[in-house]
Amino acid sequence: MSDDVDRAQERELLDRELALAAQRARTPRGVTLSTTCEDCGESIEPKRRELLPYTQCCASCAHDRERDERCL
């Protein structure tokens, strides 16, 4: 059973790494990615920028945006 769990965790890690590599490959050369949230002006979390290089807002503001869109 633990072998199945280990293989599943390894596969999940590989899938995540492949998705990140694909996202990096789609990043146009010469594009400067912002480190500051356009909504609140605070710094965008480094992990969020790594996972979502084109994001323009911090996690908190993204959550607020999603909540607001659901209420429309």
Image (cartoon, grey):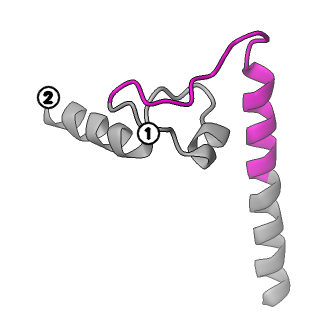
Label 1 vs 2, first from the N-terminus: 1
Q: Quadrant of the C terminus?
A: top left
Crowding at label 1, few (<14), some or many (≥20) Cα neighbours within 10 Å?
many
The residue labelled by disc 1 is 58
Q: Residue at x 33, y 32 (%)?
A: 40
Q: Total label count? A: 2
Label 2 SS: loop
Position in image of residue 34 (x %, y %): 57, 24
Q: Quadrant of the N terminus?
A: bottom right
Q: Residue at x 64, y 41 (%)?
A: 51
Q: Quadrant of residue 50?
A: top right
The tag on residue 72 is 2
Position of residue 51 in the picture relative to residue 5 (left or right) = left
Q: CA distance from mark 1 to mark 2?
A: 21 Å
Q: Is residue 5 above or below residue 36?
A: below
Q: Is residue 62 above or below residue 12?
A: above
Q: Amino acid at mark 2?
A: Leu
Residue 7 on the magenta segment: no
Crowding at label 2, few (<14), some or many (≥20) Cα neighbours within 10 Å?
few
Q: Amino acid at mark 1?
A: Cys
Label 1 SS: loop
Q: Nearer the viewer, residue 17 or 57?
A: 57
Q: Residue at x 23, y 41 (%)?
A: 67
In the current view of this chain or complex, which residue is farthest to the top?
30
The span shown in magenta is 15-39
Position in image of residue 16 (x %, y %): 74, 50
